[in-house]
Image (tube, rainbow, N blue to C red):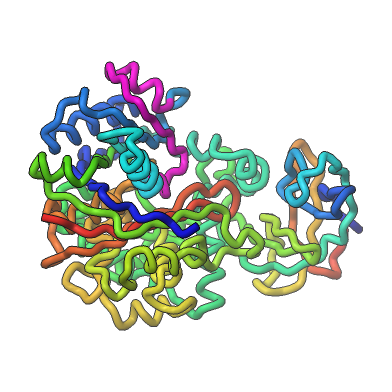
Amino acid sequence: MTITLQGCAQCGARQYPPRALCRACLADALRPVEETGEGRLIVSAIVHRSLEPGFAGDLPLRIGTVHLDCGLRIIAFVDAGLVDGQSVRLRQEAGAVALWHAGALEAGV
Amino acid sequence: MAVQPFDGVAVVAPTTVRYVRHSDKPAHWWVGRALHDVIAAAGIAKEEVDGLALSSFTMGPDTTIAMTEHFDMAPRWIEWLPTGGASGVMALRRAARAVQMGDASVVACIGADTANPASFAELVRNFSHFSDSAVRPYGAPGPNGMFALITANYMARFGATRADFGAIATSQRANAAGNPNALLGSKVLNLEQYLAAPAIVEPLHLFDCVMPCAGAEAFLVMSEERARGLGLPHAVIRGSIERHNAYFDEPVAVRAGWAMDRDSLYAQAGVGPEAMDCLEVYDDYPVIVAMQLEDLGFCAKGEAAQFLRHNSLTIEGALPVNTSGGQLSCGQAGAAGGFLPVVEALRQITGQTLGRRVAGARLALASGYGMVTYDRCLATAAAVLEGRA
């Protein structure tokens, strides 16, 4: 299972969050690229208070910073049972906004 | 080319428009009040102000130019600084250069914001494209979420504990006693209370987070000659730095731009951190105070916790930090929070404090940190100021 990120056809850079041009070489040559989604959960935190009432029913939520093997960092929801520092795999939940979830490596989707 | 000195420039008239938790007045009122008060403090007429540098989050869609019309001004130099926590030092730097070059004679530098129960959430919602697309969907934690991650990472990596951050929050609260502008200044905060506070985004709890409020901070920049002529106690700029998006490849921020530029800061100043009588740093969260202690050279990277276990940050201590109580005790009046370090440094070294003064303070370091557009603040700036009677 792979994830889709924004990549540059000219210099090969990957980027997240998406940008209008390549962050490294500024080329107008962005295209979707497939990556493994493997990386490390650097750190996580537990959201008890949201700024928006719409999230009240979902709290508490665990979020974290995943450092992908390709060098990008992504803020994601973190599956229960994961430990900060462990290897994880990101998966993308389809929707109007594609949400990232960090899960155990073997879990896949 | 080396950084040119800020010779001949004076900073005067530290001004604070008293903070309130909520205000039904627009940001324009807070800007105008600050302008009214800062020229009154200097004893000059509005017409003498020919430069205007502003920072505000709640003035939209207006910027500095609209304020000239609001308040019948015809300045020959304006600046708009949408850089929040770094905007005070940035305004100082730009105004100083304008005065040195003759582009302006008297620059009013103002950070001002209003606040109502809905304004903070709205501000966060419209803060940046990245935060809207890549942070908000994750429970809309706001800056609390990103700084919880920075704090947790710092604790795991360097062995800091909640009690270490509590030492920052409680010492700043002690410093706030006697400052009538500190909205929380009359509320005692001890370590037990700090540790027992409700969780916001773990590991952050209530007293790690600033309370949004309305308020304004301001100062004037003019020539030293003019400040002396007006008989104003003033400060000179011994050195100053600024950096944006430093270390952007670090997966979680453990340092920021000060680390890149502090050698330049102290080389300009001709003194090191040990010479500072007080340190006024940006305190959106205690971990950022710790980061500034390290990145500005008061201790090595990762050693702020040890430093805090052996050094008090109170006004009576060896290194007084955030002598007004900081935003953690005064409240965060939007962009005025980015002016607070400069204004409080100026108060301390010119003997014009609202609360208690560090005895004999002459040299102060003011530092700013602003704009969490994704998972860290991007803007850093700092200045060494020296008081002149």
Q: Nearer the viewer, residue B287 or B84?
A: B84
User: Residue B96: x and y, percent?
Assistant: 33, 44
Q: Is residue B382 visible?
A: yes
Report the side of B16 relative to B210 (left or right). Answer: left
Can you tell which quarter of the image residue B31 is in?
top left
**How many numbered discs, if any?**
0
Q: Residue at x 33, y 73 (%)?
A: B272
User: Residue B246: x and y, percent?
Assistant: 57, 59
Q: Residue at x 87, y 61 (%)?
A: A36
User: Residue B126: x and y, percent?
Assistant: 55, 35
Q: From what the image shows, is residue A103 above or below residue B105?
A: below
Q: Nearer the viewer, residue B283 or B266?
A: B266
Q: From what the image shows, is residue B82 above or below residue B363?
A: above
Q: Is residue B284 visible?
A: no
Report the side of A35 relative to B194 (left or right). Answer: right
Q: From what the image shows, is residue B164 above or below residue B2?
A: below
Q: Is residue B86 magenta?
A: yes
Can you tell which quarter of the image residue B362 is in?
bottom left
User: Residue B39: x and y, percent?
Assistant: 17, 32
Q: Which residues are magenta?
A: B63-87
Can you tell which quarter of the image residue B69 is in?
top left
Q: Nearer the viewer, residue B369 or A104?
A: B369
Q: Residue at x 67, y 55 (%)?
A: A75
Q: Residue at x 76, y 72 (%)?
A: A87
Q: Is residue B375 magenta?
A: no
Q: Nearer the viewer, residue B22 or B80?
A: B80
Quadrant location of the C terminus of chain B? bottom left
